[in-house]
Image (cartoon, helix red, strand yellow):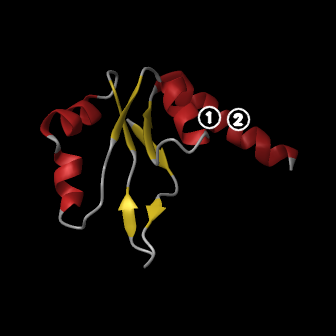
Amino acid sequence: MLVAGCGSDENADGSLSEIRLDYAYYSPTSLVLKEFGWAEEEFADENIDAPLTLSRGSNKALEFLNSDSVDFGSRAGAAALAAYWLANQEKDLK
């Protein structure tokens, strides 16, 4: 599983208030995090919410990341390769 992410909501004092994650049927790690509530549990002591959003495919995870709907999204297979290729293409065009 590859994980990518950026940004999050902050409190007035600059501390994080929320880390938005995705989970997906193709990502066993994310399913375990969701099933047992480990992400929410881990961040609860720091008063950080960790909502989970279902990604119905790597392409959706990438869309969520690009639209700033999630901070960390899982992706696999062809979508990871395509994202890598597209990122390199953008660098070449600049």
In the rendered structure, which amino acid carries the disc numbered 1? Answer: Ala
Residue 81, percent from left and from top: 58, 30
Mark linked to residue 83? 1
Where residue 31 sits, quadrant-wise, is top left
Check residue 11 in the rendering and tell me which mark sits there, or answer none. Answer: none
- State the residue at coordinates (61%, 40%): 66
| Residue drawn at (30%, 54%) of the image | 49
Q: Which SS class for mark 1?
A: helix
Query: How far across and down, in percent of the image, does residue 47 sit?
Result: 25, 64
Return the residue nearer the eye: 29 or 20. 20
Instruction: Classify residue 72 as left or right of residue 89.
Output: left
**In the rendered structure, which amino acid carries the disc numbered 2?**
Leu
Label 1 close to label 2 by CB (< 8 Å)? yes
Circle 1: is it few (<14), some (14-19), or many (20+) Cα within 10 Å? some
User: Residue 71 at what x, y percent from top left?
Assistant: 46, 49
* Cα separation between marks 1 and 2: 5 Å
Q: Quadrant of residue 12?
A: bottom left
Q: State whether residue 16 is above or below residue 92.
A: below
For the residue carrying disc 2, how many other residues have a C-alpha within 10 Å: few (<14), some (14-19), or many (20+)? Answer: few
Q: Position of residue 63 (x, y in %)?
A: 57, 32
Residue linked to disc 2? 86
Residue name at image x 45 percent, y 28 percent: 76
**Residue 3 left/right relative to 49:** right
Residue lying farthest to the left in this orientation = 36
Residue at x-position 69% and y-position 41%: 87
Which one is nearer the viewer's eye here, 49 or 43? 49
